[in-house]
Amino acid sequence: MKSLYLTGDQLPFNLDLTLSCGQVFRWFREGDWWNGVINQKLVSICQDGDILTYTGWSESEIIQYFNLHLSLPGIISSIRRSITTYSGLACDPFFEYAITAGQGLRIVKQDPWETLISFICSQNSNIPAITRRINLLCERYGSPIGDNKFGFPTPEALAHLDCNLLRECSTGYRAPYISRTAAMVLQQPDMLTRLQDLSISDARKKLIELPGVGPKVADCILLFGYNQMEIVPVDVWIRSIITSAYFQSSLQTPSKNTWSYDDISNFCREYYGPYAGYAQQLLFAARKDLPAPSLPATPGG
DNA sequence: ATCCAGGTACCCA
DNA sequence: TGGGTACATGGA
């Protein structure tokens, strides 16, 4: 058991919020500890103030996984600067609330393959059901790690599976998406690695070629699996938050009263800047108790 | 019970 | 190119 003392721009850090905010589905709180499986290794971590205590992985792995080499205060400053540049206003009180509520939230660096299958599983579902679904898949098709823990299933393990079997993991109509996507990744084993070398928009196009992957799932993979921090996934919550907070006022023009996925995602990227994905995650984490929005900005300028 | 959820594929004009 | 709809399942 080792300890890591967080200092400087590694703070603030909120382990509970980071692991429970719906970006990752394979961590379990057991007492004071969070247990998970990363790269087929059982790992544990707990937080006491500025001290992280851990087993099963190294300090450098922890820093990489939680992006602790990035300055969270710096990210927040960048978002605030972008808001001011876009809107001309000194501050966005609505977004300030999300910053307060999401104090210490970190976007993690997940394995792209696990992120891909996890967010195919996420579509049209809610976080408890997604968590249950993914962990059923791991129990049935992952390799046992010990203490009733399982690794994430490999592409081989999921490819060409009978969809009736996959449905026993509560995957529903997503079952063929999972097996067919696994088959395509199996057929091109370096595909997910090579996405790193493509432009964001090319990587996104390649992801959307996979069955069950549309714009939202692709964007989640880009943000959580590849840490493309400017990418803003738009789910029903973000759509509702952004339209009510920013689009309800003067922009309700007769020609434009519905907003496309790209309208919302692109507005967020312009408004929040290079760390728009981080802004999105703060809003998502605070989605259930955001205040009535003020109206500091409108799309298009 | 009814509606909803970190959406996508498919069809149709 | 864009709008409507079916889809399996479980949570609230």
Image (tube, coloured by chain):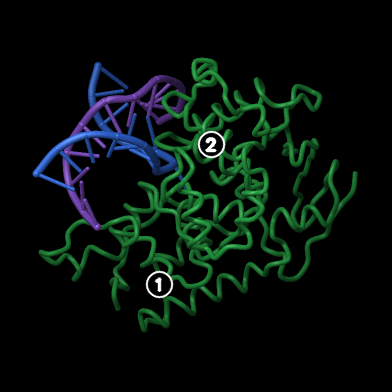
Chain colours: A green, B blue, C purple
- From the image, tell me which residue sits under label 2: A181
Q: Position of A26 compared to A51: left or right?
A: left
Q: Position of A58 compared to A173: left or right?
A: right
A218 and A292: which is toward the camera: A218
Q: How many marks?
A: 2
Q: Residue at x 76, y 44 (%)?
A: A46
| Residue A23 point in image, percent of width and height | 56, 46
In the rendered image, the vertical position of residue A14 relative to residue A148, given as above or below: below
- Disc 1 to disc 2, C-alpha distance: 34 Å
Element type where label 1 sits in the image = helix
Q: Residue at x 50, y 20 (%)?
A: A163
Question: Are there few (<14), some (14-19), or many (20+) residues within 10 Å of tag 2?
Answer: many
Q: Quadrant of the C terminus of chain A?
A: bottom left
Type of the residue with mark 2: Thr
Task: Say which quarter of the image contains residue B9.
Answer: top left
Type of the residue with mark 1: Tyr
